[in-house]
Amino acid sequence: NAGVTQTPKFRVLKTGQSMTLLCAQDMNHEYMYWYRQDPGMGLRLIHYSVGEGTTAKGEVPDGYNVSRLKKQNFLLGLESAAPSQTSVYFCASSSPGGTTDTQYFGPGTRLTVL
Amino acid sequence: SQKIEQNSEALNIQEGKTATLTCNYTNYSPAYLQWYRQDPGRGPVFLLLIRENEKEKRKERLKVTFDTTLKQSLFHITASQPADSATYLCALVTGANNLFFGTGTRLTVIP
């Protein structure tokens, strides 16, 4: 059981470039989440999904898009990266019951936008 | 405005002592409160969950209390060990998929 995995681990982008972060989970969880973590700000929810083919906005969704084409994968896209999107991104998943139950986090992706 | 505050950014204690971490919140009505541990370069790992109608929860050397009147949760690690050194995050759950994290307290247990 790999749990929650994230690809890539590190990435450096120039302003205006695009990229996609991939999250995969092998626990058959219905719910998946994308967070960003910034110093002094804590973890903030970007987008989440309650099932295959569904997505919803979290606390800080602007500048990001997501897709959940397969139950085990949740993709986070940056269409035109900005320096303000420099952060560590975490994916998480949980079983039905949503955030009332345990969230399992991936190891994170450190993104720098120059 | 809504706020979640965890006491001091950093807390240093001697091995064997009890570490007490605080999570205070304003303008939230959480149904649940969770505590996570995060090691450098890793994702958070769930430790304990406590519901609004529970006063206290224990798991091995960990104890969590939840006072909805004071709007505060306390997280205790008894007989602390250097391996307990990490950042501890509290998270408020206000409803389905509404999870709000504090900024964390970095605990260092000194041998």
Image (spheres, coloured by chain):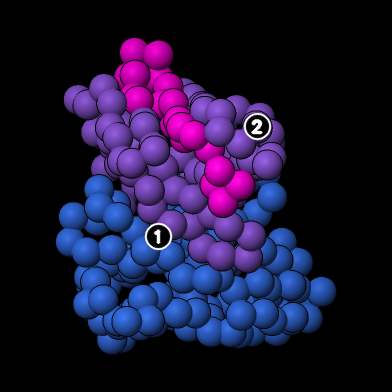
Image-based side of A67 in relation to B108, left or right: left
Give me the disc on residue A57. 1
Give chain B's shade: purple
Pick out the residue farthest to the top: B69
The answer to if B82 sits in the magenta stretch is yes
For the residues beneath circles 1 and 2, the answer to whether they share a chain is no
Q: Position of residue A25 (x, y in %)?
A: 34, 79
| Mark identifier at residue B13 | 2
**Residue A26 picture location, percent across and down:** 30, 81
Inspect the image, locate mark 1, and give the three-letter code of the amino acid beneath it: Lys
Q: Quadrant of the C terminus of chain A?
A: bottom right
- Looking at the image, which is closer to me, B19 or A18? B19
Q: Determine whether the residue tagged by mark 2 lies in a helix, strand or loop.
A: strand
Q: Which chain is blue?
A: A
Q: Is residue B23 visible?
A: no
Q: How many marks?
A: 2
Tell me the distance, in whole angstroms, between the alpha carbons under discs 1 and 2. 40 Å
Q: Which residues are magenta?
A: B65-85
* Residue found at x 75% / y 73%: A113
Q: Quadrant of the N terminus of chain A?
A: bottom left
Closer to us: B94 or B89: B89
Q: Would you call the spot at circle 1 few (<14 residues within 10 Å), some (14-19), or many (20 or more)?
A: some
